[in-house]
Amino acid sequence: MTEQVFGGFPSRRLRRLRKHDFSRRLVRENTLTVDDLIYPVFVLPGFQRREAVPSMPGIERLSIDLLLEEAAELVQLGVPLIALFPVVNSSQKTLLAEEAYNPEGLAQEAVRALKEAFPELGVMTDVALDPFTVHGQDGIIDDDGYVLNDVTTEVLVKQALSHAEAGADIVAPSDMMDGRIGAIRQALEEAGFINTQIMAYSAKYASNYYGPFRDAVGSSGNLKGGNKSTYQMDPANGDEALQEVALDIQEGADSVMVKPGMPYLDVVRRVKDQFGVPTFAYQVSGEYAMHMAAIQNGWLKERETVLESLMCFKRAGADGILTYFAKRVAQWLKEQD
């Protein structure tokens, strides 16, 4: 855009279109709808169990019976997809994460219950081993604590297959092992799950914004101050994210994700511009916690700030957003209709 093409002030006053609500609405470049929302939920074993997550005000861990009540509200609000994160007992955590692919495991049981009660609600599962390992890492470790890529991938394939068999619509590998998308896609195809989607956490960074999530799923205590820098991405890198996305698409991912969200919107934009594939972003637990802290202190307006934050994802190119605000936002959007 140049002055020669468009002319200058005062013949062109950009504020003219901003003066009235009707004209602001007419020229708005991006919109946020309920179709953009994915709701992450923490699932507990047992019955009639509800536990608050202290570092995430307003978010609770739910047993499956209460999860179904939550799902009924989501269906009524029109939220298209729920993402499940199991919180298993410490006694079920092992070095080899066998509980991850238990056909009667918590995630598998939750998927079956949801699909039976609400077949129209999309169900996505987390394919990762950190909730099931005694050390809190996303894979199988050697004697030095290094996460072994190919051995871990073998377990991830078993986990993804168990989720597909339970009825999951989307499996979402969030581990960042090399080659795991191709291995999972091949296994799904061979097992006849040709329509089970893979949403790959393609650009998942070794971020400090995950702290509240690790508290919520009970892996922070197992991690004991360790980090995941040997397999999750360096926050300093952007070009590398494009390589990761390219590999995952080539291996059979149906959609890709950038995680965390707002601090990495530049990566979302680059991924969308470069590949044009369905691109999602995760407004992670730390982002939620920061918003809620400021909101509860009266420093920020809740509704206006949250909606603005999600619009930023859309402007950056995200096709959808995983956000702990999804249910609240869906309610607000319904009120606007």
Image: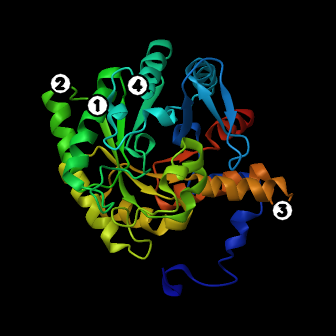
Q: Label 4, label 2: how many angstroms apart (C-alpha)?
A: 22 Å
Q: Nearer the viewer, mark 4 or mark 1?
A: 4
Q: Label 4, label 1: how many angstroms apart (C-alpha)?
A: 19 Å
Q: Label 4, label 3: how many angstroms apart (C-alpha)?
A: 42 Å
Residue for badge 1: 196
Asked if residue 121 lies left or right of residue 271, the reply is right
Residue for badge 3: 299
Tell which of 170 and 208 is nearer to you.
208
Residue for badge 4: 105
Residue for badge 2: 192
Q: Residue 91, position in %: x, y?
A: 47, 33
Label 4 vs 3, first from the N-terminus = 4
Q: Residues within 10 Å of mark 3 (few under 14, many from 20)?
A: few
Q: Label 2, label 1: how many angstroms apart (C-alpha)?
A: 9 Å
Identify whether 18 is placed above or below 256: below
Identify whether 95 is placed above or below 166: below
Label 2, secondary structure: give it. Answer: loop
Q: Amino acid at mark 3?
A: Trp
Label 2 vs 3, first from the N-terminus = 2
Identify whether 183 is placed above or below 220: above
Label 4, secondary structure: give it. Answer: loop
* Residue appearing at x 69%, y 76% in the figure: 13
CB atoms at circles 4 and 1 under 8 Å apart?
A: no
Q: Residues within 10 Å of mark 1 (few under 14, many from 20)?
A: many
Q: Residue 3, position in %: x, y?
A: 53, 86
Label 4 vs 2, first from the N-terminus = 4
Q: Amino acid at mark 1?
A: Thr
Q: Label 2, label 3: how many angstroms apart (C-alpha)?
A: 52 Å
Q: Quadrant of residue 160?
A: top left
Q: Residues within 10 Å of mark 4 (few under 14, many from 20)?
A: some
Asked if residue 324 lies left or right of residue 1, the reply is right
